Image: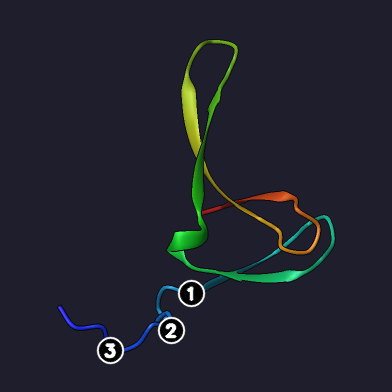
Amino acid sequence: MKVISTVPHHSVVKQCVCRKCGSTLEYTPNDVTENPVTDYTGCTDIYKVINCGNCGTEITVS
């Protein structure tokens, strides 16, 4: 394997808007973490989230 560039390819870079502060965020798959949430029935859902770099709000992404 040979690394040609460390800049993320445009096909993996995504954008979203923070609903709290209105900042436009750009992120790559490396920025996404999984947050498991268990509901009252005991079922667990896994949400993919990033944190806003401006206000720190957790944002659910796809």
Tell whether 45 sits left or right of 5. Answer: right
Secondary structure found at label 1: loop
Residue where numbered disc 2 is placed: 7
Residue in the image at 81% along x and 57% along y: 55
Q: Position of residue 14 (x, y in %)?
A: 53, 71
Q: Residue 34 vs residue 19: left or right? A: left
Find the distance from the CA under tag 3 to the CA under tag 1.
17 Å
Helix, strand or loop under label 3:
loop
Q: Which residue is mark 1?
A: 13
Circle 3 crowding by C-alpha within 10 Å: few under 14, some 14–19, many from 20? few
Whole-percent x, y for residue 58 in the image: 68, 48
Q: Residue at x 48, y 30 (%)?
A: 45
Q: Residues within 10 Å of mark 2 (few under 14, many from 20)?
A: few
Q: Position of residue 52 (x, y in %)?
A: 71, 59
50 relative position to 58: left or right: left
Name the disc covering residue 36, or none.
none
Type of the residue with mark 3: Ile
C-alpha distance separating marks 3 and 2: 9 Å
Spot occupied by residue 54 in the image (x, y as percentages of width and height): 78, 64
Of the residues shown, which amino acid type is indicated by label 1?
Answer: Val
> From this viewpoint, which residue is outermost toward the left?
1
**Corner quadrant of residue 27:** bottom right
The residue sitting at 26% across, 83% down in the picture is 3
- Circle count: 3
Q: Is residue 8 above or below residue 18?
A: below
Tags 3 and 1 in contact by the CB under 8 Å rule?
Answer: no
